[in-house]
Amino acid sequence: MNHKQTGRFWRSAAQCLLGGIAVALVTFVCFRLNVSVTTAALLYLIVVVLASLAGSFVLSAVVSIIAILCLDYFFTEPLFIIDVTLSEPLNLVAADYLPGNRVGHYQPDGQRAQVVRSPAGAGQPP
């Protein structure tokens, strides 16, 4: 690997580590406060969206998978067992991962989205 690829790899690795730390912090606080699964899922979703805005596809995918596993392990019955059935992962991925991925898609590199305006009178009936 050349220097540019190595730097990109370490930047992605550092972002994934920070995303994992953010998920761990949310898990710790939510578990200590004994919040509901819905509240924990919302906070995980916020972390995934923020990670998607800050990073790449790999970052949002890694943070989403970690958040899904933590949500299942710490907040769903039976506790402390990863028991993901066939229908649960599809619902969790749709609810947790896809919004974060879409936000990162529409806001590349942290730039503000631009509004495209049509010329005056365009689309108006004569």
Image (cartoon, grey):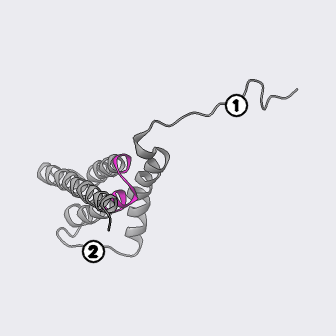
Give coordinates of residue 97: x percent, y percent. Answer: 39, 58
The one of 31 and 18 positioned closer to us in this rendering: 18
Question: Seen from this angle, which residue lies furthest top?
Answer: 120
Between disc 1 and disc 2, the foreground one is 1
Any mark on residue 81, and which?
Answer: none
Q: Is 81 situated above or below 115?
A: below
Q: Amino acid at mark 2?
A: Asp
Image point (35%, 75%), residue name: 85
Secondary structure state at the residue bearing disc 2: loop
Q: Which stretch is magenta?
A: 52-62
Residue at mark 1 to residue at mark 2: CA–CA distance: 51 Å
Residue that label 2 marks: 83
Residue 33 among those drawn in magenta:
no
Identity of the amino acid at label 1? Ser
Q: Please say whether residue 61 is one of the residues in the magenta stretch.
A: yes
Q: Quadrant of the N terminus?
A: bottom left
* Mark closest to the chain's N terminus, 1 or 2: 2
Residue 21: x, y in percent? 18, 54
Q: Secondary structure at mark 1?
A: loop
Q: Is residue 124 above or below residue 27?
A: above
Q: Is residue 75 left or right of residue 52?
A: left
Q: What label does residue 118 carry, if any?
A: 1
How crowded is the residue under tag 2: few (<14 C-alpha within 10 Å), some, or many (20+)? Answer: some
Which is nearer the eye, 104 or 25? Answer: 104
Quarter of the image where the C terminus is located: top right
Image position, residue 94 (x, y; %): 44, 60
Residue at x 38% of width, y 46% of height: 53
Location of residue 75 (image quadrant): bottom left
Badge 1 density bin: few <14, some 14–19, many ≥20, Cα 10 Å = few
Count of labels in the image = 2
Q: Main secondary structure of the magenta part?
A: helix
